[in-house]
Amino acid sequence: MTDNRLEKADGQFENPLVWPLFEVLQETDREWRVHTLSSHLIEKGLLTQLDESPDKDLFKRNFLIMNALYQLQTELYPEQWLQVEAMSIQLFSVAKTAGSTQAIDTTHPLREYYVEWTNYQVEEDEVKRLLNDFWSNYRRYLGGSSTISSMDRIQALKLFGLSESATAKEIRKQWRKLAMQHHPDRESGNADKFRTMCEAWNLLR
């Protein structure tokens, strides 16, 4: 298995909270707030203490959640509309937004702030370490067959439908596409395939 360093692509890190948040939002039609999402993720064991300082810990948790929400908003649009506001977070189906003028405002100051990783205010290596820890927790949360761990890089690329010369950008793009396709909370989803895709991404990232 290759090392677990998190590769940076297109100026972004792959935030592993994207998929747990998607599951939470799919579970119910309720309206969430950042602090209630945070509590829910902590209960699931997917979000732990990030800093010894309570104030910094709160900031970092909120930053990672908002960053993941904005990434997920982009992935789901226009099939679904994810409303992202600090005090009003809710996932809507296309049917509920039919005829609306909802669109992603890529220039919104709040969005611009939370998608920019430099605002996390820590060194890049610390961000990588932190998110690698999240990925480890998420893989344990997903469970599945231990035989998946025997996969190597070439097999992972083949699973993604990519050649050995694939760039980091191409790998990341294909991962997003396949994760969205196979996530078990999607109508066409498949839990086993999703776990396998996560393992392949863990090797390739």
Image: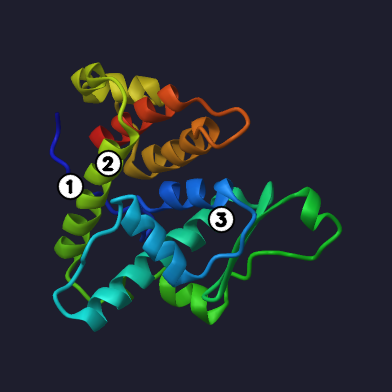
25 to the left or right of 148: right
Residue 70 placement (x, y as % from top left): 50, 62
Which secondary structure, mark 2?
loop
Q: Determine whether 170 is above or below 10 in the image.
A: above
Which secondary structure, mark 3?
helix
Q: Would residue 13 be visible to someone looking at this image? A: no
Which residue is located at x 75 percent, y 49 percent? 94
The residue carrying mark 3 is 74
Circle 1 packing at 10 Å, graded few (<14), some (14-19), many (20+), is some
Which residue is located at x 30 percent, y 52 percent? 46
Please say if the residues under marks 2 and 1 sit with CB atoms less than 8 Å apart.
Answer: yes
Q: Determine whether 44 is above or below 181 in the image.
A: below
Q: Amino acid at mark 1?
A: Arg
Q: Amino acid at mark 2?
A: Arg
Q: Which mark is residue 205?
A: 2
Which secondary structure, mark 1?
loop
